[in-house]
Image (cartoon, rainbow, N blue to C red):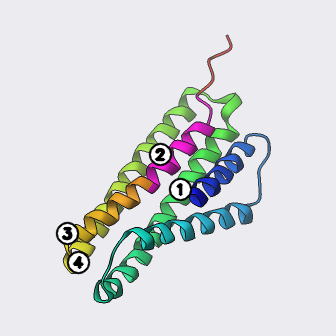
Amino acid sequence: MKKLTILILFFACAIGYSQIEHFEADYIELIKKDIQAESRKIVEENLELTAEQANVFWPLYDEYDAAYDAIVDERLKIIEDYMLDYYALDDETTKDLINRSIELNQKTLDTKEVYINKMLDELPATVVGKFFQIDNRIAALIDVIRMSTIPLIRKDED
């Protein structure tokens, strides 16, 4: 868990850096892959699966991870747009960012619901429940770190 926190901190710093200048997409991809690997490792260490359950779970996890990766890309785009417009943020842009964020939150919930149902069709509810507890904790940690590095909207300088 400590490694994941460190990777997330690097990721958050990279996002903060975008306020100054645009950084390499390859760097972001590398950090995302590290976070994904650490997340998978945390799930492996904390989710006790039988061999039969593992054969069912891991392909579903990989599908979920790929679907979630697309959501992360959208989240990064919203953050990038916010940071690039930070000093010239107007009402229209702010409303757009709010709406995009709400839509993305709903997409996240919808994706989780799809994979909860897929997993429940194949695995015991206790296994699925524990996985989503672990997943939600990882997501919460990432959210806290991300939110702590993104500045609040500036006060209008009239």
Q: Earlier in the sequence, mark 2 or mark 4?
A: 2
Residue type at mark 3: give it.
Ala
Q: CA distance from mark 3 to mark 1?
A: 30 Å
From the image, tell me which residue sits under label 3.
Answer: 125
Q: Secondary structure at mark 4?
A: loop
Find numbered disc 1 in the image and state the secondary structure of the residue it sits on.
helix
* Contact between labelled residues 3 and 4, with CB atoms less than 8 Å apart: yes
Q: Please say whether residue 146 is one of the residues in the magenta stretch.
A: yes
Q: Earlier in the sequence, mark 3 or mark 1?
A: 1
The majority secondary structure of the magenta stretch comes to: helix
The reply to whether dot 2 and dot 1 touch (C-beta < 8 Å) is yes
Callout 4 amino acid: Leu
The residue pinned by badge 1 equals 74
Looking at the rendered image, the quarter that the C terminus falls into is top right
Q: Please name the residue that numbered disc 4 is placed on.
A: 123
Residue 118: x, y in percent? 26, 74
Instruction: Tell me which numbered mark, 2 or 1, is placed earlier along the sequence.
Output: 1
Snapshot quadrant of residue 153: top right
Q: How many angstroms separate mark 2 from mark 4 (CA)?
A: 34 Å
Pick the front one: 93 or 151: 151
